[in-house]
């Protein structure tokens, strides 16, 4: 009986061993499928992140191009304004110089008129009654509505 008992036990062990192998095989397949699905999700997530970053790079490149264009236009505008400002400063200097020259002429005329007032010329800008070359030249320029040009010859009296 021992032999029959031993044979039964052996077949029971084989049967339970076969079902355990089958169960382990099923678990192994299930784990493989789960790992495959997890890897697929990971690849999809990675691809989505890559696509999002690519889109962001393209957006930033476009924005950078707009900013560079804007800076270029602003720089060009600045240079234009700076050039205009330089011209205006030069004109201001010239006008200040001309104003100073005119003030010097008026001062000269006033001092000459006060020092040498013999009744010949009461107002040098009204009439041509003075014999002075400079005053006659100023009167002619005033009457012709021409710009007044000061020269060193005119100041020599």
Image: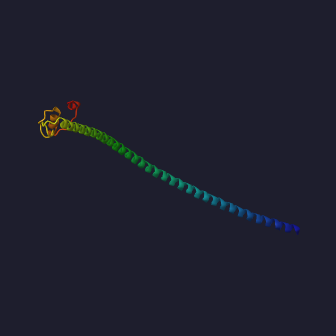
- Eyeballing the image, is 157 above or below 52? above
Q: Is residue 67 left or right of residue 94?
A: right
Q: Extreme right residue here? A: 1
Q: Position of residue 73 (x, y in %)?
A: 37, 46
Q: Quadrant of the N terminus?
A: bottom right
Q: Residue at x 36, y 45 (%)?
A: 78
Q: Position of residue 117 (x, y in %)?
A: 16, 36
Q: In front here: 120 or 4? A: 120
Q: Is residue 36 left or right of residue 125?
A: right
Q: Is residue 57 left or right of residue 39?
A: left
Q: Residue at x 48, y 53 (%)?
A: 56
Based on the displayed image, in which of its 4 quarters is residue 131 positioned?
A: top left
Q: How is the image coloured?
A: rainbow
Q: Position of residue 95 (x, y in %)?
A: 27, 40
Q: Is residue 128 left or right of residue 77?
A: left
- Eyeballing the image, is 117 above or below 29? above
Q: Residue at x 20, y 37 (%)?
A: 109
Q: In front here: 79 or 94? A: 94
Q: Quadrant of the C terminus?
A: top left
Q: Position of residue 58 (x, y in %)?
A: 46, 51
Based on the displayed image, in which of its 4 quarters is residue 30 positioned?
A: bottom right
Q: In front here: 6 or 35? A: 35
């Amino acid at each position: 009986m021992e032999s029959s008992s031993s044979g039964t036990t052996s077949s029971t062990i084989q049967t339970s061993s076969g079902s355990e192998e089958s169960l382990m095989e099923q678990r192994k397949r299930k784990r493989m499928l789960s790992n495959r699905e997890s890897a697929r999700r990971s690849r999809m997530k990675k691809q989505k992140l890559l696509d999002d970053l690519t889109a962001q790079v393209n957006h930033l490149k476009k924005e950078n191009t707009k900013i560079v264009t804007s800076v270029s236009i602003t720089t060009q505008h600045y240079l234009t304004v700076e050039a205009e400002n330089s011209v205006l400063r030069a004109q201001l200097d010239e006008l200040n110089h001309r104003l100073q020259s005119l003030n010097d002429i008026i001062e000269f005329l006033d001092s000459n008129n006060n020092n040498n007032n013999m009744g010949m010329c009461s107002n040098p800008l009204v009439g041509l009654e003075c014999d002075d070359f400079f005053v006659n030249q100023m009167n002619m320029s005033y009457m012709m509505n021409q710009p007044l040009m000061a020269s060193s010859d005119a100041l020599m009296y």
